């Protein structure tokens, strides 16, 4: 009785061999054609006359940016956003693909009428939907866009749309948060363009977090020993613990912003001792797009091209023997995988721990942590689960 298993295996092997031979012959044929073109000088800069080909593959992209000035228009001060999910739906409303924006802010969808690797493979109506993060807004009001694709022989992908997708601008809801110590009440006032927009009286021990009006530009704290004033940024602010036991920076004090672009002209360098007159421990300066798919390194960058991060996610410090005022700093989570990571910021004056605050980090946007402490000598940064923390725009007084 014949061994059917052996026969089937032999047949399969012959099929594979035949396919390999065909592929090899096609490769040789293409190589010969290419070789003939390369040996013919007249073909070096030939004008194309045959436009009947269906073309190859091209990325069709949705661009998403952080709308810093919240005006719904992509401007010079706005920044590309990494890690934003964009979904693609076909003419029947079926999900065809999804992609996150890269470090340059583009979610790419391969398009081709020829390649099976493409996700946009035929003309028709296609819909692109940007997934707006919870608590955010699409200020450009175009997070859902549709485009009609037409066949066009000779084009790079074999089809085209008459208009590219418009940039999608996102901005988070801004909030101000903090805690009131048990040693006395506090009053929080929010102003915009010199006019008081809102005032809240907070009892001792209160924990607060509330939304800011679009026009809000300043928050002020009053109470016995609690005088503080913070110029608001485009990001949410956390004031930490408001306590009369924590001497605050004077509201008219001169502020010094330390950036990290002058640490190195290259993409990466461990920050050296003495930069900006401080000692540094376990902090590296890095170009925002040095690491692939590094959402927090891109989104946590608020000025220039470089940020700091806590090396290997281990605790880090900056310090000086001479006391300085710790006004504020921008802090982010480095990766979407660590969204919601909890950071601990501890401030010391000599051997005395004078402030210890926990804040929740995001890889989508920085948090403006502003304790506004009058005198510290050391600040320690750490994360609960040892994920990297992104640091930018450290503001001090001297």
Image (cartoon, rainbow, N blue to C red):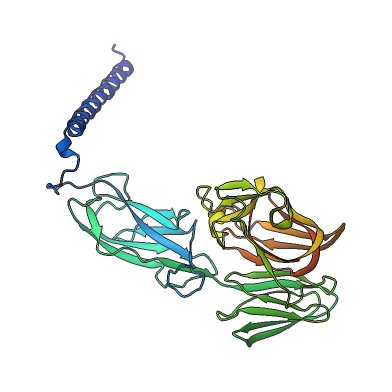
Left or right of residue 389, residue 60 in this image: left
x, y percentage for residue 114?
24, 46
Q: Which of 393 and 178 is in front in this view?
A: 393
Q: Name which residue lies at 40% across and 58% down.
A: 87
| Position of 20 relative to 173 (above/below) | above
Left or right of residue 243, residue 80 in this image: left
Left or right of residue 232, residue 6 in this image: left
Q: Name which residue lies at 16% across and 39% down.
A: 43
Q: Is residue 199 visible?
A: yes
Q: Outermost residue toward the top? A: 1
What quarter of the picture does the C terminus occupy? bottom right
| Position of 87 relative to 36 (above/below) | below
Q: Which of 291 and 339 is in front in this view?
A: 291
Q: Outermost residue toward the left? A: 49
x, y percentage for residue 157?
25, 50
Q: Name which residue lies at 43% across and 69% down.
A: 74
Q: Outermost residue toward the bottom? A: 195
x, y percentage for residue 228?
74, 77
x, y percentage for residue 264?
59, 50
What quarter of the picture does the N terminus occupy? top left
Q: Is residue 330 visible?
A: no
Which quadrant would residue 193 be assigned to in this image?
bottom right
Which quadrant would residue 88 be assigned to in this image?
bottom left
| Marker count (numbered) | 0
């Amino acid at each position: 009785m014949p061994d059917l298993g052996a026969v089937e295996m032999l047949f399969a092997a012959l099929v594979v061999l035949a396919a390999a031979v065909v592929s090899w012959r096609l490769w040789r044929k293409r190589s010969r054609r290419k070789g003939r073109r390369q040996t013919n000088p007249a073909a070096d800069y030939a004008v194309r006359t045959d436009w009947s080909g269906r073309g190859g593959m091209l990325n069709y992209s949705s661009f998403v940016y952080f709308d810093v000035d919240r005006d719904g228009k992509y401007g010079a001060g706005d920044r590309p956003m990494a890690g934003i999910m964009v979904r693609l739906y076909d003419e029947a409303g079926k999900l065809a693909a999804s992609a996150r924006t890269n470090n340059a802010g583009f979610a790419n969808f391969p398009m081709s009428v020829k390649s099976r690797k493409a996700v946009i493979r035929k003309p028709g109506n296609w819909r692109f939907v940007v997934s707006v993060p919870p608590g955010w807004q699409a200020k450009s009001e175009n997070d859902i866009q549709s485009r009609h694709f037409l066949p066009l022989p000779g084009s790079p992908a074999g089809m085209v749309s008459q208009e590219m997708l418009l940039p999608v601008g996102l901005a988070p809801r801004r909030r101000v948060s903090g805690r009131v110590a048990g040693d006395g009440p506090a009053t929080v006032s929010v102003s915009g363009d010199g006019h008081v927009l809102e005032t809240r009286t907070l009892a001792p021990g209160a924990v607060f977090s509330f939304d800011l009006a679009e026009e809000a530009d300043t928050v002020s704290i009053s109470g016995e020993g609690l005088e503080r004033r913070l110029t608001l940024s485009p990001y949410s602010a956390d004031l930490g613990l408001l306590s009369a036991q924590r001497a605050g920076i004077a509201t008219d004090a001169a502020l010094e912003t330390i950036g990290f672009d002058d640490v190195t002209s290259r993409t990466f360098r461990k920050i050296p001792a003495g930069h900006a007159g401080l000692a540094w421990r376990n902090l590296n300066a890095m170009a925002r797009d040095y690491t692939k798919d590094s959402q927090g390194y891109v989104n946590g960058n608020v000025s220039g091209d470089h940020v700091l991060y806590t090396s290997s996610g281990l605790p880090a410090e900056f310090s000086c023997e001479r006391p300085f005022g710790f006004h504020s700093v921008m802090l982010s989570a480095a990766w979407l995988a660590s969204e919601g990571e909890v950071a601990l910021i501890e401030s010391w004056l000599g051997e005395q721990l004078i402030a210890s605050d926990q804040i929740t980090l995001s890889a989508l946007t920085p948090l403006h942590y502003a304790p506004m402490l009058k005198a510290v000598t050391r600040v320690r940064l750490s994360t609960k689960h040892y994920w990297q923390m992104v640091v930018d725009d450290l503001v001090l007084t001297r």
